[in-house]
Amino acid sequence: MLTERLLNIESAGISNGADLILDNVDLHLHEAEFCYLVGKTGSGKTSFIRTLYAENKLHSGTANILGYDLSSISRKEIPQLRRKLGMIFQSFQLFPEWTVARNLAYVLSVTGWKDKEEIRARIEELLMMVGLTSKINEKVFLLSGGEKQRVAIARALLNEPKIILADEPTGNLDAETSDDILLLLRDVAINNGTSIILATHDQRVIEKFPARTLKFIDGSVVEA
Ligand SMILES: Nc1ncnc2c1ncn2[C@@H]1O[C@H](COP(=O)(O)OP(=O)(O)OP(=O)(O)O)[C@@H](O)[C@H]1O
Ligand SMILES: [Mg+2]
C-alpha cells in the first residue's frame, strides 16, 4: 500500500534568499520516511530547508508541503504551516534565561493551548520522552549542549508535527550524544509516523543510522 505523501516537490528552483542556487529539484516524501541531506558547505541544504518552511520564496516549479502550495502560500498561512512542522536547528534557538518548562509552555500557548494542567501534562510527557524530566525547572543556559538539543527536540514535537526539519541538529554534539539524538528521532519516525529531513555533515551518523540520502552537488539534488 502506498502511504500518504507529505511533501511533493517537482522541478523546483531553490533560492538562498537572493539567487537561484538549485534547479530541477524533485522530492517526494512519505509518512515516516527519514531522509538525510548531505553536500559540501554552501551547497544549499539550509536554503532548501528554509524554502520548506516558507522562509525563502520558492523560485520556480511546484512544491506542496502538508497541503500548502509553496508557490502561492499567503502571509497568513505561513504560521499555520510552521505550526504543523517541527523545526530543529544546530543552535537550538531556545530562550536561555527561561526554564525548560517555560520554553516549552511558550510554544504551546502561542499555538492555542489554554488549559494550564494540559500544558503541564504535555510538557512532562515530552520531557519524559527525551529523558529530561529532572531538568524541567532548570534554566536553559545551565544545560549541556546535548540537553539543550533534547529540549529543542521536545519543543519540535509538542504539537505532533507530521514533518520534522532538522538542520545539523548534531553539529555541536559529541558522538555519543549525537547517537542519542538520532535514536530519538528515528523512534519518532517509527512510532509517530513523522517524516524527518535532516541536513548533516556527519558521515559517521549516516553510516551508523543508514537512511535515504539526498546529495546536494553542483546546483542539483540527487539520490545518493
Ligand atoms: N540570505 C542570503 N543571501 C545571499 N546569499 C546567501 C544567503 N543565504 C545563504 N547564501 C549563500 O547561498 C549558498 C548556499 O547556502 P546554504 O546555507 O543553503 O548552504 P548549506 O548547504 O546549508 O551549507 P552548510 O553545510 O555550510 O550549512 C552559500 O553560498 C551561501 O553563502
Ligand atoms: Mg547549512
Image (spheres, rainbow, N blue to C red):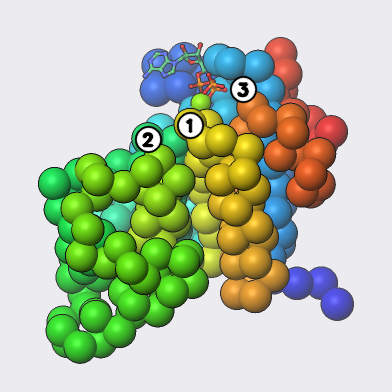
Instruction: Please provide percent x and percent y for residue 170.
Output: 54, 38
**Given contact means CB atoms under 8 Å apart, are the residues at marks 3 and 1 in contact?**
no
Instruction: Please provide percent x and percent y for residue 195.
Output: 62, 60
Instruction: Please provide percent x and percent y for residue 61.
Output: 60, 36
Residue 8 visible to the viewer: no
Question: Amino acid type of disc 1?
Answer: Asn
Instruction: Identify the residue shown where x is 44% and y is 55%.
Output: 150
Question: Amino acid type of disc 3?
Answer: Leu
Label drawn at residue 91: 2
Residue named by callout 3 = 22
Estimate the spatial distance between the alpha carbons at disc 3 and disc 1, rounded to whole Å. 27 Å
Label drawn at residue 6: none
Q: Is residue 20 left or right of residue 90?
A: right
Q: Is residue 152 above or below residue 114?
A: above
Q: Secondary structure at mark 1?
A: loop
Instruction: Identify the residue shown where x is 15% and y is 84%.
Output: 116
Instruction: Please provide percent x and percent y for residue 220.
Output: 71, 23
Q: Is residue 165 left or right of residue 39?
A: left
**Quadrant in the rendering for residue 178:** top right
Q: Earlier in the sequence, mark 3 or mark 2?
A: 3
Identify the image quadrant of the C terminus. top right
Residue named by callout 1 = 172
Q: Is residue 112 left or right of residue 70?
A: left
Instruction: Identify the residue shown where x is 13% and y is 46%.
Output: 97
**Given contact means CB atoms under 8 Å apart, are the residues at marks 2 and 1 in contact?**
yes
Label 1 within 8 A of ligand 1 by Cβ:
no
